[in-house]
Image (spheres, rainbow, N blue to C red):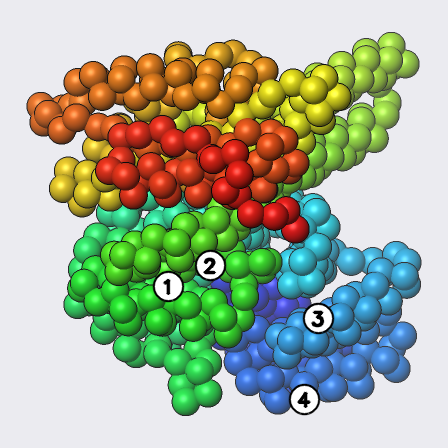
């Protein structure tokens, strides 16, 4: 093998087997001239990704010393590409992006397909670190297309892994699972340890988020069986995903062992404090230690209120649910409700971000396909004018169809974002979008309007006794009954957990109470069963507040309805209480 062949082999190994790429680079670096510079470049690239950052800097300086006198603009630009990777790995994402923008401003540098993959992948990861979702997705998809074009397996596997991981972060789970499964399959076929570990960790998280706990555990088992062929220390870096896989299938002792190995240090730091806190708190809760679970979860959320924003939104959502479950187990229903409301905010953000990611991914895929078609046209420019005209018509038709499909996707995604996936009712987000308009209409027409808060009685006991699948079935049947018995003009939403809200225009408190009484009688008369198991008779309690007597905004009316609901609960449940006309305090 000559030095030029070694450079080609180093590009092929750069993402598949970085240690081999480093060894090939060092061999070529012993020569003279620009090939030696290419050798040092591969040493720097490998060391900055999986090795020693100091050695990477030394190799980078050696490469610059050889590229510079030769006036090799491509080589110097690639040195800066590697430097940008190092800046990003040091956490200086803004400096990395400025350096990448400077490279882009230099014009045509004669990049090869391998060079372009390196550049696109680096830009995508930097955009991701800076929270620039659209730009990151477009570069990730462009990197995948470039990897497929250059025919290098390591680059293709890495591109698939990165796309799967990013879609997982964006909670676009279907795409995350598809790309990660393809990446792991290709990595296993290639027996590439670096690629296997990254793809497997993505899949564990994605399967767990999809509720496929057995599949997540199977991937973890594969990693553990494969440990001897992974790079040294790989599994030590992934203790939390292994804990997640064990916890999902109820293997508490095994999960606890991994959590203990990755516990926060004396400064309260670990690789992912939100994830660790969620898993540890859930373990405590499953061992009936609700007090410690609540303290741990609330401390993690108060130290860093990550439920407001961030890439760990799914983990934060789970941590909020642990808080709610622990508070409920301790009998603190008010705190449980508060944590559930925060969880709903995070969930709405996840849904919105997922919808945006799917739309951007669709657009990026279409743009890449269109670019490929345009390249095909350029290569076939010898065809007749008539052939070109027909192709243009086809492209325009395809574009129109794609625009229509994108518009339909936006409509479907918006509807999904406003619907509760379990019951099919509208959700809290829809309630707060629609209610102000109904209140304004009632105000202009001087018409009555009621806000009703409904809570299923003894729902936690039903869940604990018969299981969550029974609780889900009860919620679905009650939602169906609500849709059947309330008026079409009433806005009915699932507010969270076993709570529902109805905004009822053109009806006074007595009329609403009469309608709800009929609903309660129908609900109590339903035969509740799950499979062959018969459930006890169910009931609900409800509180009614009237606009404008009890408030001029949805928040005020919900607060008053909640007080009336509390009164119904205190008086024995299975009741509908109206908010007294005078006992509601002063508006703030």
- Residue at position x 41%, y 89% from top? 266
| Frontmost residue, 39 versus 317 | 317
Disc 4 marks which residue?
58
User: As drawn, is 267 to the left or to the right of 459?
Assistant: right
Give yes or no for contact between labels 3 and 2 (Cβ–Cβ under 8 Å). no
Q: How far, Cα to Cα, is label 1 from label 3?
A: 28 Å
Disc 3 marks which residue?
93
- 1 or 3: mark nearer the eye: 1
- Look at the image and tell me whether residue 410 can be seen: no
Which element carries disc 2, helix, strand or loop?
Answer: helix
Question: Which is more N-terminal, label 4 or label 2?
Answer: 4
Quadrant of res 265: bottom left
Disc 2 marks which residue?
316
Question: Which is more N-terminal, label 3 or label 4?
Answer: 4
Percent across and percent down for residue 337 are 41, 50
Q: How far, Cα to Cα, is label 3 from label 2?
A: 24 Å
Disc 1 marks which residue?
278
Compared with 76, 130 (above or below) is above
Which element carries disc 3, helix, strand or loop?
Answer: helix
Question: Which is more N-terminal, label 2 or label 3?
Answer: 3
Give yes or no for contact between labels 4 and 1 (Cβ–Cβ under 8 Å). no
Give yes or no for contact between labels 2 and 4 (Cβ–Cβ under 8 Å). no
Q: How far, Cα to Cα, is label 2 from label 4?
A: 41 Å
Quadrant of res 486: top left
User: As drawn, is 384 to the left or to the right of 517?
Assistant: right
Quick one: label 1, few (<14), some, or many (20+) residues within 10 Å? many
Percent across and percent down for residue 560 are 50, 40
């Amino acid at each position: 093998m000559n030095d030029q062949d070694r450079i080609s082999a180093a590009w092929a190994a750069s993402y598949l087997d970085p240690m081999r790429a480093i060894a090939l680079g060092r061999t070529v670096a012993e020569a003279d001239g620009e090939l030696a510079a290419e050798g040092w470049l591969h040493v720097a690239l490998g060391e900055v990704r999986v090795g020693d950052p100091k050695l990477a800097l030394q190799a980078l300086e050696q490469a610059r010393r050889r590229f510079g006198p030769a006036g090799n603009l491509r080589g110097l630009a690639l040195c800066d590409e590697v430097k940008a990777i190092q800046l990003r790995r040091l956490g200086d994402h803004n400096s990395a992006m400025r350096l990448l923008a400077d490279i882009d401003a230099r014009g045509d540098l004669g990049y090869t397909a391998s060079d372009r993959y390196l550049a696109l992948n680096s830009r995508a990861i930097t955009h991701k670190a800076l929270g620039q979702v659209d730009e990151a997705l477009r570069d990730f998809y462009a990197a995948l297309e470039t990897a497929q074009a250059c025919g290098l397996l390591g680059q293709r596997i890495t591109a698939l892994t990165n796309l799967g991981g990013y879609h997982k972060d964006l909670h676009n789970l279907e795409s995350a699972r598809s790309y990660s499964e393809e990446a792991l399959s290709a990595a296993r076929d290639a027996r590439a340890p670096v690629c296997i570990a990254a793809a497997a960790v993505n899949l564990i998280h994605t399967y767990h988020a999809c509720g496929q706990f057995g599949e997540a555990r199977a991937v973890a088992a594969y990693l553990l069986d494969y440990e001897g062929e992974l790079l040294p220390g790989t599994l030590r870096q992934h203790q939390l995903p292994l804990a997640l896989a064990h916890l999902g299938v109820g293997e508490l002792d095994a999960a606890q062992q991994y959590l203990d190995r990755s516990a926060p240090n004396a400064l309260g730091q670990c690789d992912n404090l939100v994830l660790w806190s969620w898993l540890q708190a859930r373990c405590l809760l499953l061992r009936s230690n609700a007090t410690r679970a609540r303290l741990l979860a609330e401390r993690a959320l108060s130290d860093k209120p990550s439920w407001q924003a961030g890439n760990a939104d799914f983990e934060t959502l789970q941590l909020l649910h642990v808080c709610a479950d622990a508070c409920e187990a301790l009998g603190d229903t008010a705190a449980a409700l508060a944590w559930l409301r925060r969880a709903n905010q995070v969930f709405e953000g996840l849904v919105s971000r997922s919808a945006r990611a799917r739309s951007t991914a669709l657009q990026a895929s279409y743009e890449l396909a269109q670019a490929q078609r345009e390249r095909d046209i350029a290569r076939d420019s010898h065809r007749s004018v008539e052939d070109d005209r027909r192709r243009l018509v086809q492209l325009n038709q395809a574009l129109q169809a794609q625009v229509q499909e994108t518009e339909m996707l936006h409509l479907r995604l918006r509807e999904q974002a406003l619907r509760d996936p379990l019951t099919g009712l509208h959700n809290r987000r829809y309630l707060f979008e629609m209610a102000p308009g109904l209140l304004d209409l009632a105000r202009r027409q001087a018409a009555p309007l009621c806000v009703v808060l409904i809570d299923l009685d003894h729902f936690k006991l039903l869940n604990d006794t018969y299981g969550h699948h029974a609780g889900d079935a009860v919620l679905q049947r009650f939602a169906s009954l609500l849709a059947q018995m309330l008026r079409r003009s009433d806005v009915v939403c699932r507010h969270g957990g076993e709570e529902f809200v109805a905004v009822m225009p053109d009806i006074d408190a007595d009329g609403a109470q009469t309608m709800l009484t009929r609903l309660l009688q129908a609900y109590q008369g339903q035969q509740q069963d799950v499979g062959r198991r018969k459930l006890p008779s169910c009931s609900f309690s409800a509180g009614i507040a009237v606009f404008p007597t009890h408030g001029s905004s949805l928040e005020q009316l919900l607060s008053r309805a909640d007080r009336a609901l509390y009164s119904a609960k205190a008086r024995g449940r299975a009741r509908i209480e109206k908010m007294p006309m005078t006992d509601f305090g002063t508006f703030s």
